[in-house]
Image (spheres, grey):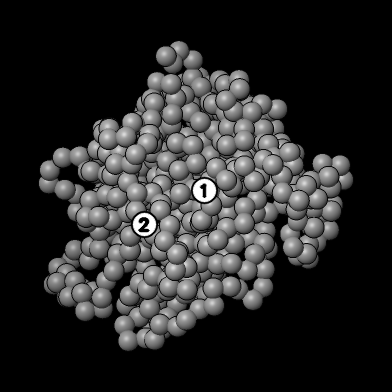
Amino acid sequence: MLTRLSRRNLLTTTMGAAGGAAAVSLIRPARATAAPLRLAAGTRTLDVNGKAASVFSLTGPGGKPGLTLAPGERFSVSLANDTKGPTIIHWHGQLPPWRQDGFPWPQTPPLAAGATQAYDFAPIPGTFWMHSHQRMQEQVLMTAPLIVHSAADQRADRQEVVLLLHDFSFRSPDDILAGLTKASPGQAMASPSTMTMGGGMAAMNMGGMAMGAGAAPDLNDVDYDAFLANDRTLADPEVVRVASPGRIRLRVINGASASQFWLDLGALRGSVVAVDGHEVQPVSVRRLPLSMAQRVDILLNITVPGAFPILAQVEGKRARAGILLVTQGAAVPNLPVSAETLAPPADLSLEKVLRAAASLIPRPADVVHRIVLAGQVSPYAWSINGQYWPNITPLMVALGQRVALDMVNHSMMVHPMHLHGHAFQVVALNGVPLAGAVRDTVMVPARGSARVVFDANNPGRWAFHCHNLYHMMTGMMTEIRYPGIV
Ligand SMILES: [Cu+2]
């Protein structure tokens, strides 16, 4: 998952390129043959806190998790289902023809055990990921990075580091979901305030965190056993060797099913250059929130030797995961797995300052869909426009239309809303207009709103849903549909 590069190798590479004008390439060149890449959905045993867990895997060429594509390379993939049951893998954020999107529509059923399916489309470059859209396999780590390099990446001469975050439970997702829908005592206590008092008392649900005046969102539906960074806990983190001085492109993917993180770069400052695979005007950061399914690309420059933890702390909790960037010869420190203080709720502090590197061409919306997000933790159910998947009315769009989605959140939880098959631009947050990021997943704040626009340029049937897995599983999903699809 990580591109490891020793200083010696780096020097060798640098020296090799020193004689010519060509930039040092840390990116694999395009393959000579066009044979599809094999991707296997399988199972494996993962050690978590000294205990064995049976989890899924998505293994690409070379036995590595997921796929990394060279600049200009097609997404030509043969997906083999090596598990004992059905699965279907979604290429999150990519813009394929809808039948290759990896969503279980009647026209595109899951792959049976032992089956193989071919995919072939032109991918867009950036940091993406793949995950099962078959029930709750995503919670059991049927997730992996999908990195598509660009020609600019190839020229950039930066060490690539991928950081995939997860939330992990030894319980089965069915047990977790049953626990939620039965409403635990804690949820039952928080719920009446949520429903009848405008959420003023909902801070009870946050373990006594001090919140400012106004609505305090409900956090963390699920009590997880561990949080993972590249499959490892902070008790035994991945150590990535980096050069000093060194230039890094850090690609962070929040692959967690129901957890939001604060990413903390520690002693480093970084520059956010892309979100969800789409370039933004650079923003200098040390700490930033990352909602479920979102990605962020951060440029880091190592200027002195040492060990540099990259940590991801769960909102409302002390728990965290992370990796260590360590220069040659520097000691690898032990890091406490818990932070000293609780992390605040993930917020819009980054989102509201993001500006797309390339905005959509301004034009009025041809169609505006108002999307009311509602629900509560007890009884545990989440809806879109009062409807619960699969009993929904599709939101119709037509080819060539500029579409606006006006999302209004009536609930006390945030909802990371994800649209398949399109990239949208965030054009308002809580009613404040902005030329925000182009992306595929936006966090709609509790008791707040977000407006996004996109061009209807990819006919088909497209899922539009909350990326909190348990919200999606209890109803918060609908369809954006073009006419004439059979
Ligand atoms: Cu949600």
Quadrant that contains the N terminus: bottom left
> x%, y% of residue 244?
34, 80
Quadrant of the rendered image containing residue 300: bottom left
Query: Which residue is located at x 47 percent, y 62 percent?
Result: 228
Q: Who is closer to the viewer here, 475 or 274?
A: 475
Q: Residues within 10 Å of mark 2 (few under 14, many from 20)?
A: few
Q: Is residue 328 above or below residue 224?
A: below
> x%, y% of residue 247?
35, 71
Q: Is residue 87 left or right of residue 338?
A: left
Q: Is residue 303 left or right of residue 13?
A: right
Question: Is there any visible trace of residue 26 in the rendered image?
Answer: yes
| Residue carrying label 1 | 172
Q: Residues within 10 Å of mark 1 (few under 14, many from 20)?
A: some
Quadrant that contains the C terminus: top left
Question: What type is the residue that disc 1 sits on?
Answer: Ser
| Residue carrying label 2 | 45
Quadrant of the rendered image containing residue 26: bottom left
Question: Is there any visible trace of residue 254 in the rendered image?
Answer: no
> x%, y% of residue 76?
24, 38
